[in-house]
Image: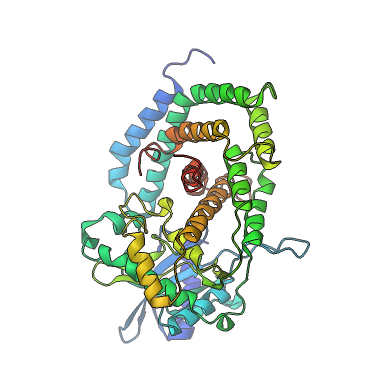
Amino acid sequence: MSAEAVGQAIAGVLSRIAGAGELQGLTRLTGGATKATWSFDWVGRGGERQSLILQQTAARAAPSGEGGKSAPKLTGGEDAQLMIAAREAGIPAPRVLHVLAPGDGLGEGYVTERVEGETLGKRVVGDAAFAVVRPCLAAQCGEILAAIHNLPAARVPFLAQLTVAEELSIYAGLLAPYGFVHPALSYAIRWMGERLPPDDRAGVVHADFRTGNLIVHPRDGIRCVLDWEISRIGDPMHDLGVLCMRSWRFGGKGECGGFGSREDLYAAYEKASGRSVDPERVRFWEAFSNLKWAIACVRRGSSRGADGRPAGVELAAIGRRLEEPLWDFMALAGARS
Amino acid sequence: MPAFVPSAATLLQAAADDLERDVLPALSGLPRYRVRIVLNVLRLVTRELEQAPQADAAERERLLQLLGESGVTLPELRADLAARIERGELALDDPALVAHLTAGLREALAIDSPGWTHER
């Protein structure tokens, strides 16, 4: 959608939900390679200003045939419900003001309050402005993850529950349409398949909780957790594995998110959750998450627009990051010294 | 290939240098972000033009050692290795297999993400 079309539609929505006012500073943010995020202000007649975000989520692809399970992907409405439940539990999720309806003319998605802070991984792990708060972030992550994993599943009944075997077969299956052959990918898929742990723990898992999806403030640390759309019910150690992936450290020091230590993360998590951390299980999920990121690189790198042309340089170039997670996978698998 | 002058790699390098020196500083916001990605892509393709022939030859040599004369082209050899891994015909801790995969990733990273193999 053009900025003009989005501006007209969102002004219509805001005048209905927030009263008459004026749209100011509509800007498409750089983040979000597969969906559109817009920042804007709504200024009411009396001059009161609301800083807001419009998130247009990608329409959900038709479920695969044969009644088979597919990769978890929440609709805009479900995504919003999960964030509302998270906020009720004291988790810093975006505050939802409006869930987009078909009549809004903006597709699926929602409007949330804008939270001031930094999301760019490179700045969070490297800028001097965050030097004071950086040592606190790993423990903060542990506490927030503990709260997410303890969310009552009954509150979010739309979340899919996957066994680890289902998860592997679903994500490996995503490669099938591409006819892309890479022996290191074949190696990683077989390695995971031979080491599946038992499905002995289940909680709400965010599955994309990492540097880049956290809004960090120089004084308060983590103010908001973003990108809830692939959440599911699963093994809580999954989230700890994602957070420690090297791909999401943005060159920063510290195996936790590029800003902290595993020890700080694990200790805060255990204290807040009452669950013990199983480092071997975290390592399994870190390896698995590297495989999943490698598969995502193949898919994004191969993406095409409706006209058959490559879908844009940002997506296309992600294909060339494929070897980063595969390299790290080999180390986590203990194959590469 | 015709006797081009300058080479494709040289042309790309000149284009990338111009973009970085003269265009990037004038931009901000989304256009700046996009041009930065374009610049990275130009640098990457330049490295590919320079390094891919050697990397392909090295990979083919290793695959022939590992598999015997199982295919003619590099894609055929690669597909054969992938299929043998998937069928369980090679042990995952086979040192020759691990060494081959590691070398291939190292060569690809030298083009796609130089530096990734040095960290950690």
Viewer-side residue, A187 vs A250:
A187
Is A157 positioned to the left or the right of A65 in the image? left
The residue sitting at the top extreme is B3
| Image location of residue B84, percent across then percent down | 68, 36
| Image location of residue A162, percent across then percent down | 63, 67
Considering only vertical position in the picture, is A126 above or below B87? Answer: below
The reply to whether residue A224 is in sight is no
Is A25 positioned to the left or the right of A55 in the image? left
Is B88 positioned to the left or the right of B2 in the image? right
Q: How is the image coloured?
A: rainbow
Viewer-side residue, B95 vs A114:
B95
Image quarter of the C terminus of chain A: top left
Considering only vertical position in the picture, is B108 above or below A150? Answer: above
Total number of numbered discs in the rendering: 0
The residue lying at 36 percent from left, 28 percent from top is: B14
Quarter residue A209 falls in? bottom left
The reply to whether residue A101 is in sight is yes
| Image location of residue A201, percent across then percent down | 56, 71
Quarter residue B67 falls in? top right
The residue lying at 63 percent from left, 51 percent from top is: A194
Considering only vertical position in the picture, is A132 above or below A272? Answer: above
The residue lying at 34 percent from left, 70 percent from top is: A140
Viewer-side residue, A267 vs A214:
A267
| Image location of residue B56, percent across then percent down | 54, 25
Viewer-side residue, B53 vs A134:
A134
